[in-house]
Amino acid sequence: MEQMVLTSAQKALKINLNPNIYGTFAEIGAGQETVRHFFRAGGASGTIAKAMSAYDKDFSDAIYGIESDGRYVTERRLRKMINHEYQLMENRLDRDKAPDRCYFSFANTVATINFAKTFKGHGWIGIRFQTAPEKEANEIILHVRLHENDPKHQQETIGALGVNLIYGAFTLWQDAKSLLSSLYEGVDHTAIEVDLVNFSGPDFAQVDNRLMSLQLVKNGFTDAVIFGPEGNNLLPAEILHKKNILVVRGSFRPVTKVNMDMVQKGLRQFQASKKVDPSKTVVLFEITLNNLLMDGSLDEQDFLDRADILCSIGQTVLISKFQEYYKLVDYFAQYSTLRSGLIMGMPNLQELFDEKYYRNLTGGILEAFGRLFSRDLILFVYPMLNAHGHTYHAADAEVHPRFKPIFDYLLHNKRIRDIEEFDPSILHIFSREVLQKIRSGEEGWEQCLPLYVDQIIKEKGLFGYKTELRPAL
């Protein structure tokens, strides 16, 4: 039997009626929309220690300090808010009077849509909370992008999401995935986008935030997420804003010498361009959700195996739902108009000109290519060996005669370029063959991988590697 989803009012009332939940609300930029639900539900005096909105910047600075960048809608500001307010709870309240109380501080800092409607708005939302009086506090931090065109509706959406976060924190903290899914209860998916989430604290010690990022894409809460070499989730807007973006798409199952040669040689050519600033270049290893679902279902361990390898060799990872490249380029265009690049192998280049991927577009492949190359975009193509052992380059791609003039035009104008100075000795390496060798215990797979990657696979038992399958010495 399907469980009934509670409304915001019902969730607020259930929290208010729990005598052991007590905390503060600090909301900046979108009104006191979250705490309003708790006041209206009744019984708020048992839950709310304080509610405030430091709208004036001088007041805000006096309470939380001045930010070095002068910005107010930032993760740093949000963390200052929840930490400051939580500390006040600890300092000002006598635990002896209510020994069973679990404290919380909820905060948001939001910029809603501007008057000209040229900026839709975004915000940071977070909660610091206890699950037992004697425990250290946990934190859940979200970044949201607002998509509605009416500030009133945006405020209402922020309020509902805030209620869901508070209710989820106290009722679903033992199941982070369910907590994440509950954020959109009673909230229109098209109204707001959650593009970053980070769980921390003693009760979330076993939660892998990369996996939580993957859930955001899988659940349709956002189109893409990014995490860094340390495994921490990163805000796409901060990573990509006004940057030269270079992307390589692959399965990375596992990452091979070919993958690394593609990136190293492709990056060298990309940065040699006068339109590319090496100090503002971001390199992303992209895995599509479609790739992760190739076997029919999402294998979380397989995803984490790939993530562990890429993070261990210092790479930044993008998980996206963009099967078509033009959608990926459209996504980057939200953040940067500077030159970008896509690194791909010959098979991907040939697939790019397959019209079956563009049947959903009114203008078909011409519309897709218009969206791709209306941007300052370069395709860097890595060669491959054919069945006869000959090296194929971009000009050798098999393209339908109907699209050959487009292909020739892009090649002539250097929008499609060969990756030069590649290593011909590794062209025989394919990830799927390496994976099979790892799983079967066959010899020789170590030589196909970058330095130390084989050791990581063995030490952590990644990709199905088992010590009992190791060949006898």
Image: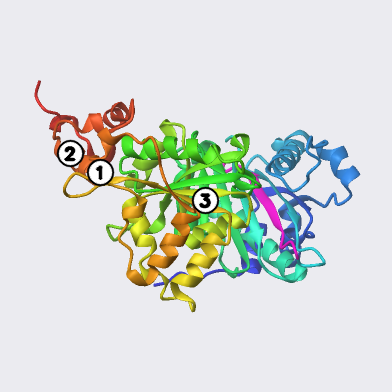
**Label 2 element class:** helix
Q: Can residue 464 be seen in this view?
A: yes
Observer-nearest of 369 and 69: 369
Q: Does the magenta stretch include residue 131?
A: yes
Q: Nearer the viewer, mark 3 or mark 1?
A: 1
152 to the left or right of 193 = right
The residue that label 2 is drawn on is 437
Is the residue marked by circle 3 packed among few (<14), some (14-19), or many (20+) residues within 10 Å? many
Of labels 3 and 2, earlier in sequence is 3
Q: Nearer the viewer, mark 3 or mark 2?
A: 2
Residue 351 position within the rendered picture, expressed as x and y whole percent measured from the top left:
35, 61
The residue that label 1 is drawn on is 430
Observer-nearest of 2 and 309: 309
Marks 3 and 2, how far apart at CA: 31 Å
The residue that label 3 is drawn on is 225
Residue 225 position within the rendered picture, expressed as x and y whole percent measured from the top left:
52, 51
Report the residue at 15% width, 35% height from top: 441
Q: Mark 3 touching mark 2, by CB under 8 A?
A: no
Amino acid tagged 1: Phe
Residue 122 position within the rendered picture, expressed as x and y whole percent measured from the top left:
69, 56
Marks 3 and 1, how far apart at CA: 27 Å
Q: In which quarter of the image is the N terminus?
A: bottom left
Quarter-wise, where is residue 390 in the image? top left
Amino acid tagged 3: Val
Marks 1 and 2, how far apart at CA: 11 Å
- Where does the magenta region start and end? 118-134
